[in-house]
Amino acid sequence: MPFWSRKGSKTKAADSSKPVDKPESVSREEECRERYNYARNRYRRLVPTDTVYKTREQKEVEEWAEQYTKEAALGILILQRLHRLQLLGSLTSERLRRHGETLTKVNDSTPPPAYSKPAQGHPHLEAEVIELRRDYWRHQLRLQGEYRRRPHPASPRMELFLVGHEYKNQYGQPYEFVDSQQECANAGGCCARSCGCCQRGLYAIEAKKDRTSPVYGHCTLECACCIQFRECYVPDERLSPPKTRPLLR
């Protein structure tokens, strides 16, 4: 998931052994989706479905996929808390406010809420941000290690799991993220509102976002926009207890 969202990465090309004929009028969005659907359906056809009991290969791939998904979700959680803390800086908050006004004018939509006021009375803010960046670095190394240790890397079952992470739409968003927008909306996340927070991606260091690619993930208990919308905060127990609480309305 996050580790292959590298700067300049492209949508994975279609299988060259069987090119897909497309009219010139097909949009970039349709082209990306068509390539993804073709690859996903191809791997689905190759995965055995007539077995009564799970094979060793199936068990190992499923166990690995579960562990990998948990680790990837932890990364999103860390990034969303980081994002919330970085918004407490007065300069970042002002940029966000101007960005929200621009979104409203251009898209005629509801802007994200004013997440915070200028940073005041947050003595632990900088230290907490630094520690979270360390946590995210360690997470990236663990996630990369999990990927390298994946069992049966060439099996159709493993390829079927990875295809949603490797194939991306015209904006560089993995289809695993794109196709889970309805789940986010059903859970009351930002995909249920017009703020567009999930679409903007996450960065460990927002001041250097032009030098890296975003990581895309949906709302967690650490989503700054959801906290403001619900007017309450429930820290996720997978992270250390927060030293800096969010500013609520």
Image (cartoon, rainbow, N blue to C red):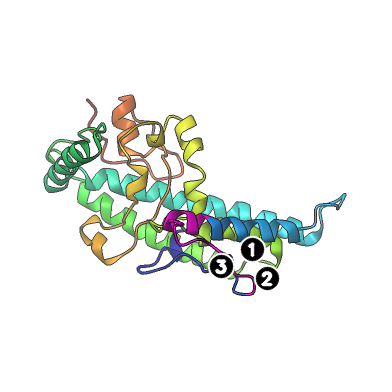
Q: Position of residue 111 (x, y in %)?
A: 24, 34
Q: Is residue 116 left or right of residue 77?
A: left
Splitting the image into 4 quarters, where does residue 157 fall?
A: bottom right
Tell me the residue that label 2 is attached to: 154
- Seen at 51% across and 45% down, the residue is 179
- Seen at 28% across and 41% down, the residue is 243
- Of the residues shown, which amino acid type is indicated by label 2? Ala
For the residue labelled by badge 3, is the local secondary structure a helix, a strand or a loop? loop
Q: Position of residue 218 (x, y in %)?
A: 43, 43
Magenta stretch, overall SS:
loop
- Seen at 50% across and 67% down, the residue is 12
Q: Is residue 28 magenta?
A: yes
For the residue labelled by badge 1, is the local secondary structure a helix, a strand or a loop? helix
Tell me the residue that label 3 is attached to: 14
For the record, the magenta segment spans 17-33
Tell me the residue that label 1 is attached to: 159
Q: Residues within 10 Å of mark 1 (few under 14, many from 20)?
A: some
Find the distance from the CA under tag 2 to the CA under tag 1.
7 Å
On the rendered image, what quadrant is the C terminus found in? top left
Find the distance from the CA under tag 3 to the CA under tag 2.
17 Å
Q: Residues within 10 Å of mark 3 (few under 14, many from 20)?
A: some
For the residue labelled by badge 2, is the local secondary structure a helix, a strand or a loop? loop
Q: Position of residue 7 (x, y in %)?
A: 35, 68
Which mark is first along the chain, 2 or 3? 3
Q: Nearer the viewer, residue 67 or 194?
A: 194
- Of the residues shown, which amino acid type is indicated by label 1? Glu
Which mark is first along the chain, 1 or 2? 2
